Amino acid sequence: MQPKKPILLVEDPGAGAPIARETLDELGIRDRVVSVAMPEVLAYLKAQGAERPHVVLLSVEESGDDGLTALRAIKQDDQLRSIPVVVLGPSGDRCIIDESFGLGAAGYMAKSPDHLEFSETMRTLYAYWDLSELPR
């Protein structure tokens, strides 16, 4: 049996309903997801004994400020930069998309307002990272 590959989900606590967490729970992978609020992401990743996530799903809101600040901090840290970060953000916001990739994001997925569409996006995203081999 393949070991579980943890996913770190980072959502802004002030952004309303935690749609990504709810969707991952509906997909039945609750036991693989660790949720952290935006301000605590660096402390969590640097904590002694914390399991290194296979991927970070970073939820970014319309302004992008907090999420992109967290992405920048992860990618500037020598010990953390190899962790893939996928940004979950507003659909069609070219500024946030371009800045996310410029900062080193491994991908960008739109948070569709359509629940079924967003659920399929999360299912595909999970399947990809579950199969992916990453550096240690």
Image (cartoon, helix red, strand yellow):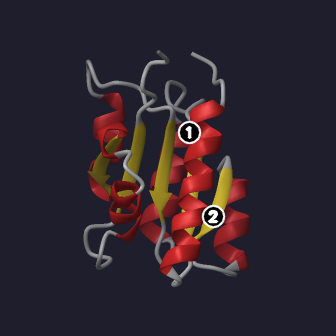
Taking the image as drawn, is residue 41 in sight?
yes
Q: Nearer the viewer, residue 26 or 9?
A: 26
Q: Which residue is mark 1?
A: 76
Q: Is residue 96 left or right of residue 1?
A: right
Q: Residue at x 68, y 64 (%)?
A: 99
Q: Is residue 73 above or below residue 21?
A: above
Identify the element where label 1 is drawn.
helix
Q: Residue at x 45, y 53 (%)?
A: 70
* Mark 2 surroundings within 10 Å by alpha-carbon count, few (fewer than 14), some (14 through 19), many (20 or more): some
Dot 2 or dot 1: first in sequence order is: 1
Identity, as a three-letter code, of the amino acid under mark 2: Met
Identify the element where label 2 is drawn.
strand
Q: Position of residue 16 (x, y in %)?
A: 29, 79
Q: Position of residue 25 (x, y in %)?
A: 33, 56
Instruction: Tell me the quarter of the image containing the C terminus.
Output: top right
Q: Which residue is mark 2?
A: 109
Identity, as a three-letter code, of the amino acid under mark 1: Gln
